[in-house]
Amino acid sequence: MNRSCFIITGTSKGIGEHLSRMLLERGHLVVGIARRSSEALLAYTSYTHISYDLSDAEGLEPLISSVIQQLDLENFGMAALINNASMLEPLKPIEQCSSEELTRSLHVSFLAPMILTSTFIRHSEHLSLQRKVMNISSGSGIYPAPGMSAYCSAKAGLNMFT
Ligand SMILES: NC(=O)c1ccc[n+]([C@@H]2O[C@H](COP(=O)([O-])OP(=O)(O)OC[C@H]3O[C@@H](n4cnc5c(N)ncnc54)[C@H](OP(=O)(O)O)[C@@H]3O)[C@@H](O)[C@H]2O)c1
């Protein structure tokens, strides 16, 4: 029962793609969520990609619920959710940020991890396996920087939530 199942956001590139590849190489199952997919990850039979825009908060609960239903999680030693996806933008002073830009940024970097965590716990509560949630933060959640108020605030919020 050493094989684990990981649901990871932001697997199309960067840290999420690299982390997924490391876990797949170790024989684990990975379900990746991002708008685009990584060609490299699609080559692994234990990788499943879900194309989804995390700024759409309404669809997150049905998404997690269907992922958990489709996976035979009792066959795994552990199920983990890794909230990795985030967006840096808007990178400008707050008075130049539109409400749409701020809403999108906070939805992807802060609200989506909270909803995914809530629904992941709720929909996997009946299972006897070990469960973990990991949220990827940043030094920006502690150290403010000019023109980065949305990103820094989202990461500070994510720190408090975690
Ligand atoms: N890189 C660093 O130096 C660094 C430093 C500190 C903390 N971090 C943190 O580490 C994590 C990963 O960073 P990274 O540099 O690897 O990021 P990245 O290369 O920019 O990749 C971001 C990932 O998030 C996904 N994403 C962005 N917006 C999305 C949306 N609306 N819906 C679904 N997926 C979305 C992207 O996929 P799509 O575009 O295909 O949707 C992509 O796969 C982030 O939480 C970041 O804050 C990174």
Image (cartoon, grey):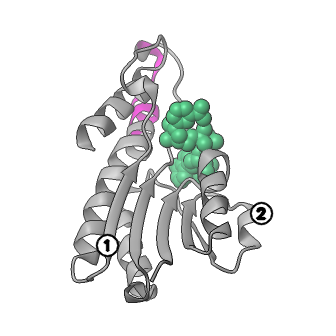
Residue drawn 67% across and 61% down? 21
73 on left or right of 14? left
Numbered disc 1: secondary structure: strand
How far across and how far down the image is residue 53, in percent?
A: 51, 56
Q: Residue 98, can we see it?
A: no
How far across and how far down the image is residue 109, in percent?
A: 42, 42
Q: Quadrant of residue 11?
A: bottom right
Q: Is residue 96 magenta-colored?
A: yes
**Which residue position holds label 2?**
40
Q: Quadrant of residue 137?
A: top left
**Which residue position holds label 1?**
130
Question: What residue range appears in magenta?
Answer: 95-103
Mark nearer the N terminus (2 vs 1): 2
Q: Looking at this view, is 58 or 150 the one in front?
A: 150
161 on left or right of 60? left
How far across and how far down the image is residue 103, in percent?
A: 38, 38
119 on left or right of 144? left
133 on left or right of 92? left
Residue drawn 48% across and 73% down? 5
Q: Is residue 85 above or below residue 37?
A: above
Q: Is residue 119 above or below residue 102?
A: below
Quadrant of picture, ligand 1: top right
Q: Are marks 2 and 1 in contact (CB under 8 Å)?
A: no
Q: Is residue 93 magenta-colored?
A: no
Q: Tag 1: residue type?
A: Gln
How far across and how far down the image is residue 9, in percent?
A: 51, 56
Numbered disc 2: secondary structure: helix
The 10 Å Cα crowd at callout 2, few under 14, some 14 to 19, many 20 or more, is few
The 10 Å Cα crowd at callout 1, few under 14, some 14 to 19, many 20 or more, is few
Q: Tag 2: residue type?
A: Ala
Q: Quadrant of residue 159?
A: top left
Quadrant housing the N terminus: bottom left
